[in-house]
Amino acid sequence: MSRNSPFNWILLILSSLVLLFILAPLAGMFLHTGGSELLETVNDQEVRASIWLTIWVAFAATFFFAIGAIPLAWLLARKEFPMKNVVQGIIDLPVVLPHTAAGIAVLGFISRDGLLGKAANSVGLTLINNPGGIALAMAFVSIPFLINAARDGFTAVPERLEKAALSLGASRTRVFFTISLPLAWRSIMTGFVMMFARGMSEFGAVVIVAYHPMVAPVLIYERFSSFGLKYARPAAVLFIIVALAVFILLRLISVRKKETHILPDAEA
Amino acid sequence: MLKLENISKKLGDFTLSGISMEIREGEYYVLLGRSGSGKTQLLELIAGLNEADSGKIWLDDEDITFKKIQDRNIGLVFQDYAIFPNLTVFGNIAYSLHCRKTDKPTIKKEVTRIAKELNISHLLNRFTHNLSGGELQRVALARTLITSPRLLLLDEPLASIDASLKDDIKRTFRQLNRKGLTIIHVTHDYSEAVSLATWIGVIHNGRVIQEGSPDDVFGKPANRFVARYAGIRNFFRVRFSKEGLSWKAESDGKLAFNLTEGSYPEEGLIIIKSSAISIYNAELPRDTGNCFKGVVKDISPCEQGMELLVEAGELFYVDVPMNDFKKLQITDTSDVWISFPSEACIVLNGGSV
């Protein structure tokens, strides 16, 4: 096909339009935010606290839920069991729910009448308007990203490598930690970053569970609804810069992990 | 040493059925079969990667049918080696020792020893993704041998190796076997079986159809499938008849073969090895059992010299050593006489595989 064919031009124009659609609002926001406004926001204790809260709660939620999500992903990749499709459907459910509805569901679960709420109350903990509750809301809407990416990662690890390790005398646990996990690591890290990023940006579910302490998306909304676009914009820009920095850092960590070459399973 | 009793296993549309075989201590057993014949599946059952649906597997009089793969002490070298790409060569070879919580100095000593034995000492610190097939094969072998397995299983070990390295690897296998290691080697290549096996099993469609020494299996193939494996190309469907004291076999092309004394069924298949047929450019003065006049239809080079296709009532493939071929001055339209003794006519039992 010629390099200047009409098809190539159409592809180029359509692709550019989509990219422009993503970049233009962001660029506009950055261009409309002056350096002094941004500096003022950086010095704003409330903004800094909310961004820090968002990052650590999203990270903690991702980290703690990964402990259960990664073995579940391995199970989905390796084992056949009854109702597996139903289980897979349940995992994907949070992705299709309206996020406010997800928030309502989590709220019901962690309120004083809810199962988890009661348990937390019994040890003197209230999850509503608490970082713990925020973490649960973030995890609820973002955990499918980690499970699905990790499942794909484990699926790509040839089963015969695990069998080879077993035949060399390794226990199932050792095989998991020395073969399956390291070889699926890149996909797991991608899922981890996606879950973390999705958790950080969550507004709908979090705002229902905890208006205070304020995570960054709630703070931006609060500033917008109370003071208008001009006051919300610098906070939004700062949050985007920080989120991007963290996102890029995590991606770099996962990419720097030595690339391994995996051959597909040999024909039986 | 290893005994399989009536092993059956269904895998999708394919079934291994009623497999019974015995591998004796120190034997080099080659399981020969085409791809899809079930040989790899059988190996995986022995190694414990899969469990049999029925039947029993005994190792040294112990029932290991449902024994955990980790506890069988059977070494398996996979067809594509299954080298762990996240570990160095050293890490791969040391893997089983780490599992056994061996101390570090012993691990280093053992890995160094086995690497030296298999000529891969220079590779120990390398990752495995840019190693050659031969090097990967040796790493896989070292990784398995370091466990001191009771039995070594090799799944198509020479399939992805350059021809120039095959002899080297074969020598290694022979040496291991000579040192007393019992080996089961799965392959589709009959020349591997001939050059390595002390005992051969031929597997076809999930069944072991013939077992025996290489001489038995290739000298007296049980059926057409095994004969084809042995490189035999002259097959004739015949009707047997007795004339006085001697037996004759008449082919579909109405060619009558003189047979040795014995008892024969009414009809069946006979095979004649290409190398057992002699060729002449003049009629023989004396009776050699079977002698037919024919015309050369095709000439092509083969391992032994030249392969001639001769039309003599039936089509015969004849291997002629290069010196004889030059002396006879045969062209592809020459009139020739072919002859073979009655003993060269091998009657197949099954006939129809």
Image (tube, rainbow, N blue to C red):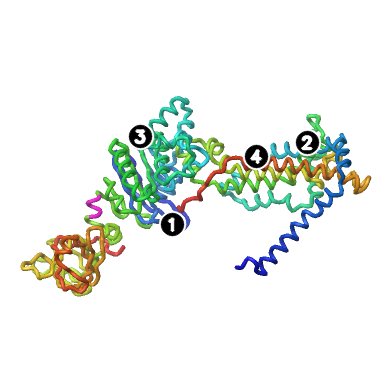
As rendered, which of B42 and A206 lies closer to the eye? Answer: A206
Say whether mark 4 and mark 3 are on the same chain: no
**How far is mark 3 from mark 4, CA to CA?**
40 Å
Nearest to the eye among marks 3 and 1: give it. 3
**How far is mark 4 from mark 2, CA to CA?**
27 Å
**How far is mark 2 from mark 1, CA to CA?**
54 Å
Residue B37 x %, y %: 38, 56
| A86 in relation to B237, above or below | above
What residue is shown with label 1? B14
Write down the chain letter for disc 2.
Answer: A
Q: Is residue B194 magenta?
A: no
Residue occupying the point 73% across, 36% down: A60
What residue is shown with label 4? A253
Type of amino acid under label 1: Phe
Nearest to the eye among marks 4 and 1: give it. 4
Counting residues from the start of the chain, the first of labels 3 and 1 encountered is: 1
**How far is mark 3 from mark 2, CA to CA?**
59 Å
What residue is shown with label 2? A132
Determine which quarter of the picture holds residue A1. bottom right
Nearest to the eye among marks 2 and 1: give it. 2
Residue occupying the point 41% across, 31% down: B112
Side of B319 relative to A88 (left or right): left
As rendered, which of A248 and B239 lies closer to the eye? Answer: A248
**How far is mark 3 from mark 1, CA to CA?**
40 Å
Write down the chain letter for disc 3.
Answer: B
Mark 3: which secondary structure?
helix
Residue occupying the point 70% across, 66% down: A10
Highlighted magenta segment, given as a residue range: B214-218
Nearest to the eye among marks 3 and 2: give it. 3
Mark 2: which secondary structure?
helix
Disc ID at residue B117: 3
| A62 in relation to B109, above or below | below
